[in-house]
Image: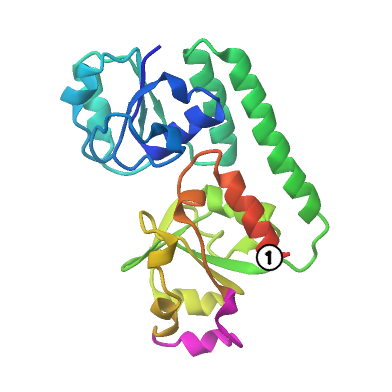
Amino acid sequence: MRVVSLCPSNTEIMEYLGLTHLLVGVDDYSDWPSSIASLPRLGPDLSIDIDKVAELQPDLVLASLSVPGMEKNVEALKKRNIPHIVLNPQSLSDIEADLLKTAEVLNEGERGIEAARRFRSRLETIKQKTKRINKRPSLYWEWWPKPIFTPGKTNWLTEISEAAGGYNVFHDVELASVQTDWEDVIKRQPDFICLAWVGVRKDKVQKSAVKKRLGFEKLNYQDDSRILILEEELYCRPSPRLLDGLEKLYEVLN
């Protein structure tokens, strides 16, 4: 089987299944695992070069709708009659289901069942540890600073927050992603600020970007240790690597 992945989370699903050896091309942003470094690059996930995809003669393309604008990639695949599936997980259970779905389409059903079992087991292990926590810290997640975007109720980061022993301060908003403002954040008085800016490496994010905002002192933090700069690749991509992020967050909060 010759497989092409059009976004990082799909590439990471292939790795979790132990099937990266089937990959013959990936999008520009796929950066894990290191074994894919030499594969042909097909453009950024929002502007995939479909001609290059067709040249690779894939048996299957793993497309995605995880970012608004990816629809045009799917339409282009349909026009060319290139075999593909579309993954669009919004929750941890969706990711588990996608492991099964992807493996099944690749005639590797047993791998999918084992990968899904392993995924569920890791998640349950952390959940059991935090089950008896009474006082759960509130977390404000920031995906993007200007304008501010944060995950709402129907989002894997709300699940991650709860599994790690806390809760998302925007869990009451019935959206996957919420555009809001800094005043609203201050009103909610989060115990921790979790910065995971999409597409921005951890070393490029500074705590000062938040500390200099108008009204920051109203949060009454004794120091800046409650501002967490987190790896966006472990929190912003709907792939099994979210469990790595969950385990790290659990250690920080507990």
* Quadrant in the picture for residue 40: top left
> Neighbour class for label 1 at 10 Å: few (<14), some, many (≥20)?
some
Q: Residue at x 28, y 37 (%)?
A: 70
Q: Residue at x 32, y 67 (%)?
A: 147
Q: Is residue 115 above or below residue 134?
A: above
* Quadrant in the picture for residue 2: top left
Residue 152, how many percent across, how many down? Answer: 49, 56
Q: Residue at x 68, y 56 (%)?
A: 164
Q: Residue at x 40, y 11 (%)?
A: 1
Residue 33, how many percent across, how many down? Answer: 46, 37
Residue type highlighted by circle 1: Leu
Q: Report the span colored magenta.
A: 214-226
Task: Specify the quadrant that holds the C terminus.
Answer: bottom right
| Residue 37 in view | yes
Q: Is residue 223 above or below residue 142?
A: below
Residue 14, how many percent across, how many down? Answer: 48, 27
Is residue 163 one of those drawn in magenta?
no
Is residue 221 one of those drawn in magenta?
yes
Which residue is under mark 1?
A: 253
Between 96 and 37, the residue placed more toward the observer is 37
